[in-house]
Amino acid sequence: MPLSIDVLSTLADGLAGVRIGLLDEGFAEAEPEVKELVLAAVDVLQGAGASVRTITVPEHHHVRYAHEALMAEGALALFNSSYFAAFTRTYYPADVIAALNTFWSAHADVLAPRSKLQLIAAQLSRRNYAGRVYAKAQNVRPTYIRAYNTALADVDVLVMPTTLTTAPKVEPVEGGYMEVLDHSLRNRLVAAGLQYRAVQFHRAPGAGHSSW
């Protein structure tokens, strides 16, 4: 890998020869405003000389489920190993690792509600499926990688909205911590295009953590 790449000297050359692929599935559930803005940006690139064509990757519709499984249980694994993993032959800063372990075990309450929600979901997944969900998500990664690589054989870049919706307005949440957690769950499901159903949270008797 080169230490540096000269990109400034070619800025005036335009985008002739650059092949842009519009990922059809990436626009399927996008809000009209989001879709229009992205396509407007692509029009600018096309006007600068890039060629544009529509690309389809049917697997894109399902990749988010594997991604959620990897992110949730992967985050739990990192949380339990103080973000320094294990088994790798490298230097492990003992003082830092001990400090992080102590902090998370005694002050996990300072985590953001969204982070806690992710860890709760991961723990439930691990408890109910004993790692099967994470393993299956890892096993399908080559399928999705192959699908995107096949598409990228015909274009230089795939374009799609970074997020399907515009940023929601942040409203103050009335109530206590459980109401904030419920609100975070609602926003995550709505953003993912899933149906929201109220979840009853409660604090386990005599415990310092929340359960559901």
Image: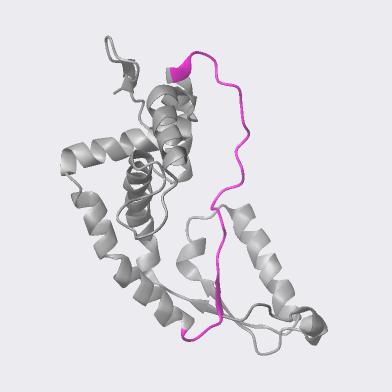
Taking the spot 70% from the left edge, 73% from the top edge, the residue there is: 43
Q: Total label count?
A: 0
Applied colour scheme? one colour
**Relative to residue 99, is residue 39 drawn left or right?**
right
Taking the spot 62% from the left edge, 31% from the top edge, the residue there is: 170
Task: Find residue 151 and report its horizontal and vertical position in percent.
Answer: 44, 79
Residue 186 appears in the rendering:
no
- Give the residue at the far top of this rendering: 206
Q: Is residue 16 above or below residue 82?
A: below
**Relative to residue 68, is residue 6 drawn left or right?**
right
**Relative to residue 167, is residue 73 drawn left or right?**
left
Q: Quadrant of residue 98?
A: top left
Task: Find residue 26 and report its horizontal and vertical position in percent.
Answer: 49, 63
Residue 11 within the segment the image draws in magenta:
no
Q: Is residue 48 above or below residue 127?
A: below
Task: Find residue 58 and report its horizontal and vertical position in percent.
Answer: 37, 69
Residue 92 appears in the rendering:
yes
- Give the residue at the far bottom of this rendering: 17
Looking at the rendered image, the quarter that the N terminus falls into is bottom right
Taking the spot 56% from the left edge, 57% from the top edge, the residue there is: 162
Looking at the rendered image, the quarter that the C terminus falls into is top left
Q: Quadrant of residue 63?
A: bottom left
Dominant secondary structure of the magenta stretch?
A: loop
Taking the spot 55% from the left edge, 53% from the top edge, the residue there is: 163
Point out the stretch of residues depicted in magenta. 153-177
Task: Find residue 87 and report its horizontal and vertical position in percent.
Answer: 29, 55
Please tell me which residue lies in front, 10 or 169. 10
Q: Quadrant of residue 61?
A: bottom left
Residue 172 within the segment the image draws in magenta:
yes
